[in-house]
């Protein structure tokens, strides 16, 4: 009968993520079998309780949502359960970004629709027509379900006793996803309370420089720029012709971000927090913007991103002047705000520099190389062709790479023009650039695309990092300039070093142990450390263990 077929079809679709995850995740054979038998038995048992199949189907809607979400993410990243960061991305990613991404995921979304929508439609039909399952059918299947569940609990007990690394919260679907939902809710609440929890924070910052000396510093935070596609970092293509022609840059080829998600990596760049203390301190500290203000600097934050009610917004609005250019209403409503190139930040930068402020910090948060790549550059920066990919897939990789490389060309022009402006200023000045994280673009024959996967690749964390200092800066501070030059040859965590390096560049001294002075690249006491990564549960783990 059709209703019996619908019962088993629905059961199979709910169990499908467990089956796939048992192959994609780093589970033992015993753990993989447990991941199928125990959840399958429990689902089977719950489905066999009520004769009202339509109601049962709709009561399982949360599990349907998880299953659909999980399959989409497995297609996108190839492995890993739905991470905490995936749930947080739902509330911190703007609508335009979601639209760009979904437009290139139609095949897998279509497959998920085929799998789950028919059951929901049948559920509505069964409810309206009061279709019920026979009690004999349910009684028999309930016995099978109890047996299956009992075997599952025995397997779980064996896993817990025999496998030291086994964890129900990490390895058993959908328990692990439910736990991640809990963590996401907890972090969202703690983030909402940020202004209260950080209200008493202070750097007690002072400037060690002469008050009459004019100082202008620009910190540029890139988006989704991976080091391997930068000519400046050894790439064979001329993606950074302007910067590569300079001989006055301090370049690090061995720099790594401690997160592949923007909502974590940017706050670490802008604060003294890194992967080792992120979960403990990110809700308590303020950004380096506040330190600059305490030291007598005027501060400006210019962004080509959208509001997302995260730490990035909180830190940005610590500035004396904060402008998100995509939040400025367009007179021409037909224009796509999300397609604004980063070059539109330059007119605002010019207005800021015209003010002749004696001491000024300017933070530029760009949109850099974020997908959709074709929207990140002007026509004159379209150097690599063809770049007109119809959608993002493995077959279009060459065109995707061309478009991605064009975004680096655009970034090269932007930063070069920032340096030219600083170079024309009468005073001392400096600029530091790095990116929040990198990107997968179907590398090494894989199906991995984009970033923010629970388990990153080297492409997602190896980032560009370089600095420029004015001649007057180098003449006035030769010792720390020499230290910077020496340290740039070492392994660097951008998440750990960006903030203390920026403070040292401006001669800002912090009392207490708020800032790790051994992480500053201007310090002769700089101590490199093995690259680490902030995992989905906000634990610092050695990078080599997960890539």
Image: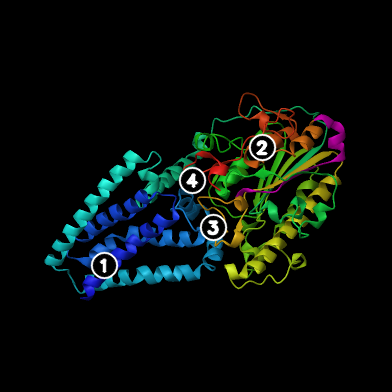
Which mark is drawn over residue 221? none
- Residue 108 visible to the viewer: yes
Q: Which mark is first along the chain, 1 or 2?
A: 1
Local packing at callout 1 (Cα closer than 10 Å; few below 14, some 14-19, many 20+) is few
Tell me how far mark 4 sits from mark 1, CA to CA. Answer: 34 Å
Asked if the magenta segment contains residue 139, the reply would be no
Asked if the magenta segment contains residue 472, the reply would be yes
Labels 2 & 3 near each other (Cβ < 8 A)? no
Residue 409 vs 463, above or below: the answer is: below
- Residue 49 visible to the viewer: no
Residue 495 vs 101, above or below: the answer is: above
The span picked out in magenta is 461-479
Which residue sits at x=20%, y=76%?
Answer: 1
Write down the residue under mark 1.
Answer: 8
Which residue is at the front of the view, 459 or 198?
459
- In the rendered image, residue 145, in percent from the top left (x then y), is placed at 21, 57
Left/right placement of residue 262 relative to residue 244 reads left
- In the rendered image, residue 542, in percent from the top left (x then y), is placed at 55, 40
């Amino acid at each position: 009968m059709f209703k019996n077929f619908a019962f088993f079809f629905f059961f199979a679709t709910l169990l499908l993520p467990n089956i796939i995850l048992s192959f994609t995740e780093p589970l033992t054979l015993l753990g993989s079998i447990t991941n199928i038998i125990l959840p399958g038995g429990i689902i089977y048992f719950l489905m066999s309780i009520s004769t009202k199949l339509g109601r049962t189907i709709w009561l399982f809607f949360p599990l349907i949502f998880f299953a659909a979400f999980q399959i989409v993410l497995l297609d996108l990243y190839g492995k890993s359960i739905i991470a905490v960061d995936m749930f947080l991305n739902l509330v911190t990613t703007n609508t335009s970004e979601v639209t760009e991404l979904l437009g290139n995921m139609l095949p897998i979304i279509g497959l998920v629709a085929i799998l789950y929508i028919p059951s929901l439609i049948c559920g509505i039909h069964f409810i309206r027509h009061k279709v019920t399952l026979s009690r004999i059918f349910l009684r028999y299947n309930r016995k099978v379900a109890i047996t299956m569940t009992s075997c599952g609990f025995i397997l779980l007990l064996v896993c817990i006793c025999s496998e030291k690394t086994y964890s129900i919260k990490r390895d058993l679907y959908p328990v692990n996803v439910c736990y991640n939902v809990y963590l996401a809710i907890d972090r969202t609440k703690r983030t909402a309370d940020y202004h209260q929890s950080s209200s008493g924070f202070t750097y007690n910052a002072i400037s060690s420089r002469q008050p009459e000396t004019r100082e202008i510093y620009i910190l540029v935070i890139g988006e989704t720029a991976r080091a391997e596609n930068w000519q400046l970092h050894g790439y064979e293509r001329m993606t950074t012709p302007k910067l590569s022609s300079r001989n006055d840059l301090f370049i690090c080829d061995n720099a790594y971000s401690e997160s592949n998600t923007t909502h974590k990596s940017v706050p670490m760049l802008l604060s003294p927090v890194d992967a080792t203390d992120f979960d403990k301190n990110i809700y308590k500290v303020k950004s380096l913007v506040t330190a600059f203000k305490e030291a007598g600097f005027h501060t400006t934050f210019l962004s080509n991103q959208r509001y997302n009610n995260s730490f990035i917004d909180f830190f940005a609005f610590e500035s004396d002047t904060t402008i998100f250019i995509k939040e400025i209403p367009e007179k021409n409503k037909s224009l796509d705000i999300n397609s604004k190139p980063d070059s539109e930040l330059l007119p605002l930068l010019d207005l800021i520099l015209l003010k002749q402020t004696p001491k000024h910090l300017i933070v530029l948060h760009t949109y850099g190389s974020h997908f959709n790549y074709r929207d990140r550059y002007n026509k004159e920066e379209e150097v690599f062709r063809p770049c007109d990919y119809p959608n993002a897939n493995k077959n279009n990789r060459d065109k995707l790479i061309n478009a991605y490389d064009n975004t680096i060309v655009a970034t090269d022009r932007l930063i070069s023009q920032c340096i030219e402006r600083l170079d024309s200023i009468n005073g001392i000045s400096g600029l530091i650039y790095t990116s929040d994280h990198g990107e997968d673009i179907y590398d090494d024959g894989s199906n991995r695309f984009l970033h923010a996967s629970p388990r990153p690749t080297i492409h997602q964390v190896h980032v560009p990092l370089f600095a420029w200092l004015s001649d007057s800066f180098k003449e006035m501070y030769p010792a720390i300039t020499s230290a910077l030059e020496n340290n740039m040859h070492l392994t660097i965590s951008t998440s750990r070093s960006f903030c203390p390096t920026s403070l040292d560049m401006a001669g800002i001294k912090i009392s207490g142990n708020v800032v790790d002075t051994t992480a500053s690249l201007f310090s002769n006491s700089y101590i490199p450390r093995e690259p680490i990564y902030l995992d989905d549960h906000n634990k610092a783990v050695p990078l080599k263990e997960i890539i």
